[in-house]
Image (tube, helix red, strand yellow):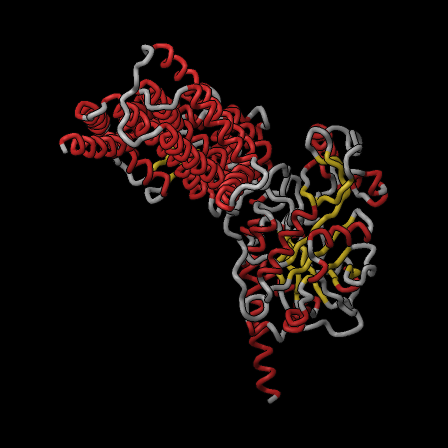
Amino acid sequence: MAIRIRTYLTALLLIAAVGLSLFGIPALYVRQEVATQPALTDRLTNALQTKQVRSVAAQEAADGLIAAGATDLLTVRPLLVPAIEAFLGSQVVESATRLAARDAYEVIINRRDSSLVLDLGTASTELAVALRSISPKVARAVPADVDAPVLSIDEKEPALVAVRRFAELRSVGLVLPLAALATFAIAIAIAPRRRLALAWAGAGLAFAGGILAVTLAIAKALTVRSATEGIGRPDLDVDSAVKALWDAMLGDLGSWAISMIVVGGVTVIVGGAVISPSGIAGWLRKVATRVLRPRPVRAERAVRGAVAALVGLGLILDPIMAVRILLIGTGILVLFWGLAELTAAMEVRGQTAGRAPGLSKGRLALIVSGAALAIGAATVAAAAVTTGRETPPEAFAAPVAGCMGSKDYCGLRLNEVAIPATHNSFSAAEQPGWYFANQRFGIADQLADGIRGFLLDFHLGVRASNGRVRTDLEGEEQDRNRVAKSLSPQQLALAERLAGRLGAGDFSGRREVYLCHSVCELGAHKATDELKLIADFLKRNPGEIVTIFAEPYAKPAVIEKTFEEAGLLPYVARLDRNKPLPTLGEMVKSGERLVVFTERDGGSPDWYLDGFSFVQDTPLGATNAGQLRCTRNRGSADSPLLLINHWIDTFPPRPSANRTIADRFLSRRVEECAAARKIAPNLIAVDFYDQSGVVAVAAERNARAAQALKQAITAGE
């Protein structure tokens, strides 16, 4: 009876010791490696100096400078970001980062402030000096007194809350590990079979290490997911930056977990509770025989299928991680084998290990292999969570009732509706690779913000071996391309410097359609990728109508194939120039909710509409507000739709200049053009739409048009 009581008590103490280890090791790590000012300063400084974090920090700092007043830096953002990134790796910034990291200690550990903000501080002055290497004009645009933030975390952010909760463990950083050690010692001391208890203590420690490793993998995945949800910024590799921050702060804890597994395994071997080397070989032969048996029983087949599916899933989701797990497992097996050999060599012939009655070698092997399989399955599942991050929520609005957001608009004809539109819609500063952009945000954001008209330039290009897209002037038939007359010598020189000789280079790659402004060397997006955003928006929003006005440098058949690949052909509208244009309600009911105009080659296919047969527009090329006119430029006097070109045409495009013609100015001009042309304005195209007020101006006109229609219907009754 006494032996049985001691056995049960030993088991309970071992379970308690495993639990204490599971919490005590992380607590000790926090106390020693995170919760002291020097340790936290070093880790945070190292994190902010990694390439992944510097890349995101540079983009955030650039946006901070722009938001602080240097708005014209927006058009040279692709030049600004790499310069700031290089600057963030300098010794000056490292010193400033250490000072900021010390402040972060007060925020994270002592909770002195409500949020964590790291900025450039006194390094802003040196930043202006560094930017002169790009352009003196760019450097002069940087506000002298701005502290551009490189990291900002609100107090309610899950990441900061988690770190603070984790930091609270420092108070028990010594108590829990010592308690775990003492509990292990007591359990072994009172055990009827101390060597066996030592082996089970090792197994428990290894189990705790495995649980800790899996928990860290899952916590890392959830933290990355929480930090990156809803970002919607293809240029921001927040995923990699958050992983780098995690690795800098908690990566070594993963190594501690692996050490627990190794130490536990060694303890198991030393305890003598593992099968002998010959037993291992026999067990492996038995497993191989069962796995490879031609006609296994149903249970074995189920197990074999489950294991195979698990391995296959791991190979699909993360081949590198799966191979690493396989190699680690093999390494552990070899380690066990070697230690067992050493233990067997040290044992006296005929000596037997004390084992509890009823615990056979086969049963112990089954338990050990089952635990290993469970830990392996959990690790693969963690890898799946880490790599299979859900796509961030769509930026698009949920389906709405009515037409273009209101049932009142369904009775309006297409030529009676004001459509907020963007000029060079694809040329977005916050998307990678765009020099001298006309918009800040890309097409997905524009759709989410209410833009429904897009002026797009379709060019032929080839992606060169260096990753840049080269304009295929020969493929475009150079007389179709307006490079020579549309770009200034300054623009051409810049394009030459950025990407080599225009139209020259390795054109052995696949010729594809890109959205570019005059030349693809200054920025390019694959046309199908951008058009798919519109197709997805139309699919998700059955009441919305979108208009594209194409400036094509590719033939109609090529454009048609591009629209087909993007999934847009089910939505294209076929309009008859000789009949009244359809109402929005009719377009929604028919499903033909994408109107495509083209500047040239319209008519075939039948949805590729001759733009300036349907549309008349206002003059282009205004370099100041006083030059904006309402006179007819292209199209004919009886063209039913009016396109108002409303932007300041300077090089580079300047947000500050376009802000002077926004909001009330835009509203007045729309009314003036409506009165002067005796036609309702339809497409209202702007640069830097987010500062223009174009969505509000269009909504105001549409509300008035819907009210007038309602009054006319009432009067007719």
Q: Quadrant of residue 682?
A: bottom right
Q: Residue at x 46, y 27 (%)?
A: 283
Q: Nearer the viewer, residue 75 or 309?
A: 309
Q: Nearer the viewer, residue 214 or 131?
A: 214
Looking at this view, name the residue that lies furthest to the front: 350
Q: Is residue 300 above or below residue 100?
A: below
- In which quadrant of the rendered image does the C terminus lie? bottom right
Q: Residue at x 45, y 30 (%)?
A: 244
Q: Is residue 346 above or below residue 420?
A: above
Q: Is residue 425 above or below residue 683?
A: above
Horizontal side, residue 580 vs residue 346: left or right: right
Horizontal side, residue 106 vs residue 236: left or right: left
- In which quadrant of the rendered image does the N terminus lie? top left
Query: In the rendered picture of this protein, how many numbered marks are placed on residues?
Result: 0
Q: Residue at x 73, y 32 (%)?
A: 464
**Which percent across, then down, holds residue 289?**
53, 32
Q: Residue at x 70, y 67 (%)?
A: 677
Horizontal side, residue 394 vs residue 686: left or right: left
**Which percent across, then down, holds residue 658?**
59, 48
Q: Is residue 245 visible?
A: yes
**Which percent across, then down, holds residue 587?**
67, 70
